Image: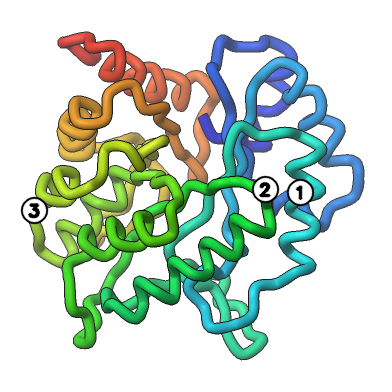
Amino acid sequence: MGLRSPHLSGVLENKPPVPWFEVMADNYLNQGEIPHRALEKIRTHYPLTFHCLGMNLGSTEVLNDSYFKRLSELIERYQPQWISDHLCWVGANGLQSHDLLPLPYTADAVSHAASRIQQAQEKLGRRMLIENLSGYLRFNQSEMTEWEFVKAVVEKADCHLLLDINNIYVNSENLRFDPYLYIDAMPVDRVKEMHLAGHLRTEGILVDNHGSAVCDEVWDLYRYAAARFPQVPTLMEWDLNIPAFEVVWAEAQKAQAVLSGVSHVA
């Protein structure tokens, strides 16, 4: 499960049997010691992973040494099992978008993104996981499909893949492709984690907002993915309209049931 502030006190008090928690690392880079007090306690009971938003791997900006220095210090402090970020860019020319922006699917973009991921891995001294993005447009310049692009980047960068199943479904509906072809194209040896989340269905478009339970179509796609990538750890994301811990935990247990090969998922 994603570790979210409304659940912190309950987790510390009740110590539910969650296998591991994902931490949004950027939330702890510029803060004082107060937020770390709870995280230090969580770390004594649970393994952690770090998920990042600010590496800016698709941008043409020089990688931010200050960001990576602070992130390395955080990694040293908490020793997460792995670190991930997105196949996207978040800023250029000194400006931050505060959003995850897509890249065109071209050979040049493959080389550019892979080189940047390699640089990031060198700065952190470890191999990372890169997450596929939810996108809402198609570039005229694109020379390949999204799944061909993602596969090419992770192989050229020699990194791992965080496969977001909801993002695949959202993109397949918005941009009209078969999401099962996407799953089939992903290299089995690169997929080390999967994400599940809910989305918002508005008039004419799906929005990846992590604000609701996982829909039936995404569960179906996840079952297919779990068969292709057996026993890959799966994270349940819920970042908007966050309900009680028990609601998110119940969703996470559905995913565990799929991974465990249970035929009936409540």
**Is residue 219 in sight in this rendering?**
no
Q: Residues within 10 Å of mark 3 (few under 14, many from 20)?
A: few
Please, is residue 65 above or below residue 150 in the view?
Answer: below
Marks 2 and 3 in Cβ contact (< 8 Å): no
The image position of residue 60, as x and y in percent, is: 53, 83
Marks 2 and 1 in Cβ contact (< 8 Å): yes
Real-space Cα separation, disc 2 to disc 1, in angstroms: 6 Å
The image position of residue 81, as x and y in percent, is: 60, 32
Q: Which residue is mark 2?
A: 25
User: Residue sitting at 32 percent across and 19 percent down?
Assistant: 254
Q: Along the polypeptide, which appears first: circle 3 or circle 1?
A: 1
Real-space Cα separation, disc 2 to disc 3, in angstroms: 33 Å
Q: Which residue is mark 1?
A: 28
Left or right: 59 with respect to 147?
right
User: Residue sitting at 50 percent across and 19 percent down?
Assistant: 246
- Looking at the rendered structure, which numbered label has been put on residue 178? 3
**Looking at the picture, which amino acid does disc 3 mark?**
Asp
The image position of residue 37, as x and y in percent, is: 86, 32
